[in-house]
Amino acid sequence: MGDIKAEPFVFPAKPEALALIVIDMQRDFAEPGGFGASLGNDVSRITKIVPDVKRLIQGFRDAGLPVIHTMECHKPDLSDLPPAKRDRGSPSIRIGDEGPMGRVLISGEPGTAILAELAPIDGEVVIEKPGKGAFYATKLSDVLKEKSITQLVFAGVTTEVCVQTTMREANDRGYECLLAEEATESYFPEFKAAAIAMIRAQGAIVGWTAHVDDILEGIAPKETADA
Ligand code: TIU
């Protein structure tokens, strides 16, 4: 492992310091009747990236690199849900309300689960987060420090909301961040394109972006040449 082909220039991957963070690949954002749909969004855009997210996760597992999953959700008593978040806009059902997949965005409910094809395996860290960013009110910083992780590859949804917010939080905390372009999606294609452009502008002001194939090639265990 070494350099990963990326924009605006190569990403200098360090095998001992690299982890994948998969943001919020939950039923609530990808299936009809969930939180994403309640906001009026076309959730079918999200399911289309599942194969690319899956092969990225598999590549990290095959390389023996950590995979961390996040879930946007709240406590059943809503004590971690600010009224400003619950009351915003006019969704068809609000966070905490009973929906077709259980209570919307509540920890432990069926709709809050990570999509079955992308489910965490034993040993992988899962961070439940009440905000859009994964560092706010979670133990993510402690987890990364304990594993000596300083570089993060990002996948998941949505590009300009929870993914970008977490990348910006990570960038300010000194992590080198790389966004996997085919493994992230927005309900708005123009917002995905804009987020990718603004992340890598100004000499990677927030981080790098790269294609899944190039990331997989960069992290693949190399055959050792015969001496
Ligand atoms: N609405 C939207 O685009 N996203 C979210 O509410 N959460 C995440 O991005 N996970």
Image (spheres, rainbow, N blue to C red):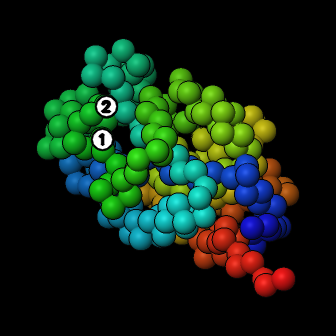
Of 82 and 208, which appears nearest the observer? 208
Residue 49 is situated, as x and y percent measured from the top left of the image, at: 43, 67
Q: Which residue is mark 2?
A: 107
Could you tell me which residue is drawn at 69 percent across and 63 percent down? 209
Label located before the other in sequence (2 or 1): 2
> Which residue extends farthest front?
227
For this rendering, which residue is in front, 221 or 212? 221
Residue 112 is labelled as: 1
Residue 101 seen in this snapshot: yes
Q: Check the image and report above or below for 141 versus 57.
A: above
- Is 174 displayed left or right of 153 in the figure? right
Q: Amino acid at mark 1?
A: Thr
For the residue pair 147 and 26, the one nearer the viewer reads as: 147
Are the two marked residues, 2 and 1, in contact with CB atoms closer than 8 angstroms?
A: yes
Q: Quadrant of the N terminus?
A: bottom right
Q: x%, y% of residue 98?
A: 16, 33
| Residue 60 in the image, given as x and y percentages of width and height | 57, 61
195, above or below 211, in the image? above
